Image (cartoon, grey):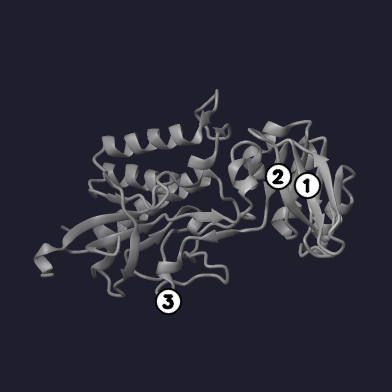
């Protein structure tokens, strides 16, 4: 492959959730001619969410897939090229003004002056067929997003860490009862969070407990729980099951080139979206393990486009 056959891009966006599309809207309006590769799940995690009620501007709510189509149309209206494809390898330049090399689908190489990483994170699930079948029908990986739909109802949550404890207490405020399933005979959450769970009367913690089966045809109707010490199985009636066993940031292809925390989230500098490499920016859930909301992802997508635009203006030639 000769150098002349390689497409050169001013602004390349990897990923197509709220962060990526917002970055594209801002980059396109700044005449950066952004090119976006959608990744394996165009639209990101929101495409698996049925109702989005907490994004400003939708008084009646909107379903996740429709919202992502709206964001794509808005990005394309300003000239963003949205392409189906997945970044499979990267070779970032460490020089200011250098070309960042990105391989798409293992066979096409593109060079970019700026790269905005918006590859998101993937919620970890238990892997049970009944759980996967009922995702969007009562099984959720985000209590803050979906808890409202189970107001006054009986729900269960799986997990033992700070996030699980935090989400359990959040659900306890709006749900009738919360059953918390902990795989071991202790919780991993900090003592403060454990005390909060213990002091919440409508949270019941079941230790040495795992989900054997999610019950229900179209929607969640109950849970079969197995005690992993005695193998005894019990059933409880619930309408919502929340999985809180962590998220995995989609950063494998960037390992060794960008600074990350122990879980794999990309580290950005201060309040910016800048990574340690010039011209490489990260936004959304790929660098945010604390908030993980569509609105915060969109906000950081805007920031990444502004950071990229400012970077380009410092280069002598960014054609």
Residue 141 in sight:
no
The residues bearing labels 2 and 3 have C-alpha atoms spaced at a distance of 39 Å
Residue 67 figure quarter: top left
Q: Marks 1 and 2: in contact by CB < 8 Å?
A: yes
Residue for point 27% across, 67% down: 100
The residues bearing labels 3 and 1 have C-alpha atoms spaced at a distance of 43 Å
**Side (left or right) of 48 relative to 127:** left
Estimate how packed mark 3 is, as few (under 14), some (14 to 19) or many (20 or more) residues with alpha carbons within 10 Å: few
Circle 1 sits on which residue?
224
Circle 2 sits on which residue?
214
* Residue at disc 1, secondary structure: strand
Vertical side of 93 occupied by 310: above or below: above
Q: Earlier in the sequence, mark 2 or mark 3?
A: 2
Q: How many marks?
A: 3
Estimate how packed mark 2 is, as few (under 14), some (14 to 19) or many (20 or more) residues with alpha carbons within 10 Å: many
Of residues 25 and 130, the one nearer the viewer is 130
Residue 18 in sight:
yes
* Residue at disc 3, secondary structure: loop
Coordinates of residue 237 in the picture (x, y in percent): 80, 37
As drawn, the residue found furthest toward the top would be: 60
The residues bearing labels 2 and 1 have C-alpha atoms spaced at a distance of 6 Å
Vertical side of 252 occupied by 45: above or below: above
**Side (left or right) of 245 relative to 186:** left
Estimate how packed mark 1 is, as few (under 14), some (14 to 19) or many (20 or more) residues with alpha carbons within 10 Å: some
Coordinates of residue 286 in the picture (x, y in percent): 48, 58
Circle 3 sits on which residue?
256
- Quadrant into which the N terminus falls: bottom left
Q: Earlier in the sequence, mark 3 or mark 1?
A: 1
Of residues 132 and 288, the one nearer the viewer is 132
Coordinates of residue 161 in the picture (x, y in percent): 73, 60
Q: Earlier in the sequence, mark 2 or mark 1?
A: 2
């Amino acid at each position: 492959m000769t150098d002349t056959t390689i497409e050169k891009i001013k602004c390349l966006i990897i990923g197509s959730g709220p962060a990526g599309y917002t970055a594209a809207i801002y980059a396109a309006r700044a005449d950066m001619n952004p090119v976006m590769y959608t990744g394996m799940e165009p639209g990101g995690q929101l495409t698996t969410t049925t109702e989005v009620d907490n994004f400003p501007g939708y008084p009646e709510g909107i379903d996740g897939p429709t919202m992502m189509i709206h964001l794509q149309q808005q990005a394309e209206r300003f000239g963003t090229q949205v392409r189906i494809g997945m970044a499979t390898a990267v070779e970032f330049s460490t020089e200011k003004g250098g070309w960042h090399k990105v391989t798409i689908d293992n066979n096409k190489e593109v060079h970019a002056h700026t790269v905005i990483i918006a590859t998101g994170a993937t919620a970890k699930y238990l892997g049970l067929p009944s759980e996967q079948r009922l995702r969007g029908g009562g099984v959720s990986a985000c209590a803050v997003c979906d808890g409202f739909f189970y107001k006054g109802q009986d729900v269960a949550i799986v997990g033992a860490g700070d996030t699980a404890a935090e989400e359990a207490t959040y659900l306890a405020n709006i749900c009738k009862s919360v059953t918390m399933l902990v795989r071991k005979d202790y919780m991993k959450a900090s003592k403060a969070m454990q005390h909060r769970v213990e002091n919440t009367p409508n949270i019941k913690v079941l230790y040495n407990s795992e989900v054997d089966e999610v019950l229900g045809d179209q929607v969640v109707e109950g849970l079969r729980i197995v005690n992993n010490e005695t193998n005894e199985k019990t059933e409880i009636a619930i309408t919502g099951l929340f999985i809180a066993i962590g998220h995995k940031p989609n950063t494998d292809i960037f390992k060794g080139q960008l600074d990350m925390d122990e879980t794999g989230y990309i580290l950005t500098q201060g309040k910016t979206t800048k990574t340690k490499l010039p011209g490489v920016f990260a936004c959304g859930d790929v660098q945010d393990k604390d908030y993980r909301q569509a609105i915060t992802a969109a906000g950081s997508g805007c920031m990444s486009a502004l950071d990229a635009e400012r970077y380009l203006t410092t280069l002598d030639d960014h054609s």
